[in-house]
Amino acid sequence: DQQVKQNSPSLSVQEGRISILNCDYTNSMFDYFLWYKKYPAEGPTFLISISSIKDKNEDGRFTVFLNKSAKHLSLHIVPSQPGDSAVYFCAASAQWNNDMRFGAGTRLTVKP
Amino acid sequence: NAGVTQTPKFQVLKTGQSMTLQCAQDMNHEYMSWYRQDPGMGLRLIHYSVGAGITDQGEVPNGYNVSRSTTEDFPLRLLSAAPSQTSVYFCASSADGNSGNTIYFGEGSWLTVV
């Protein structure tokens, strides 16, 4: 069972506009959420995270929003740049748990 | 600044063959893990280790063995390769396995079983 779901396999946006990537989860025990970015032929790299005690975390152009009641989180990229084109994975884990679950990924394409 | 190093990067195996994917990290991380990435499935945890001498199963452990004799190394063994094990494999490490610690990934190993 996929406990973390990214229902949009791909997203295309214009340079300078906002990119919004969505993620839903089913396990109410998850309390820590991360976004990873992956370029072709490379391993995923950590982008931004949020714990369940917050509903927003911002780092430069990247902001992650968490809606615990809806079991939903989103990643906003503003403004989007062509270098942001990559696959973005949402991940979640429960405190003190070594089992991190990943979504299937969303391929973001930012057009110049 | 090596980080997490995986070898080989590409491998083709025949059904029934065995092989070992190597993984090493130079960050003195206690926690290491192996994931596989398949289309539409994201990254799935195969096995993990919270320290030398300790290993445990993840979400999809069948057909794989691991050992952790040193802090630095965490090899993944395919005992008898099957076409269903065709995938991209990522080794990862973090300071410990608790949530809140960033996981660092290797560059991946592309395995094809024919």
Image (spheres, coloured by chain):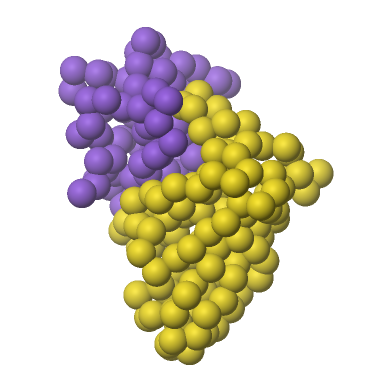
Q: Is residue B82 above or below residue A84?
A: below
Relative placement, left or right, of A71 versus A61 is: left
Residue B68 image position (x, y, % from top left): 61, 51
Q: Residue at point 57% right, 31% down?
A: B96
Q: On the rendered image, what quadrant is the N terminus of chain B found in? A: top right
Q: Nearer the viewer, residue B72 or A29?
A: B72
Q: Residue at point 20% right, 49% down?
A: A1
Residue A87 image position (x, y, % from top left): 46, 49
Q: Colour of chain A?
A: purple
Q: Residue at point 24% right, 47% down?
A: A2
Relative placement, left or right, of A96 versus B32 is: left
Task: Find the residue positioned furthest to the right.
Answer: B1
Residue B2 image position (x, y, % from top left): 77, 48
Q: How many marks?
A: 0
Residue B51 image position (x, y, % from top left): 60, 40
Q: Quadrant of residue A33?
A: top left
Q: On the rendered image, what quadrant is the C terminus of chain B found in? A: bottom left
Q: Colour of chain B?
A: yellow
Relative placement, left or right, of A24 versus B114 is: left
Q: Is residue A40 above or below residue B98?
A: below
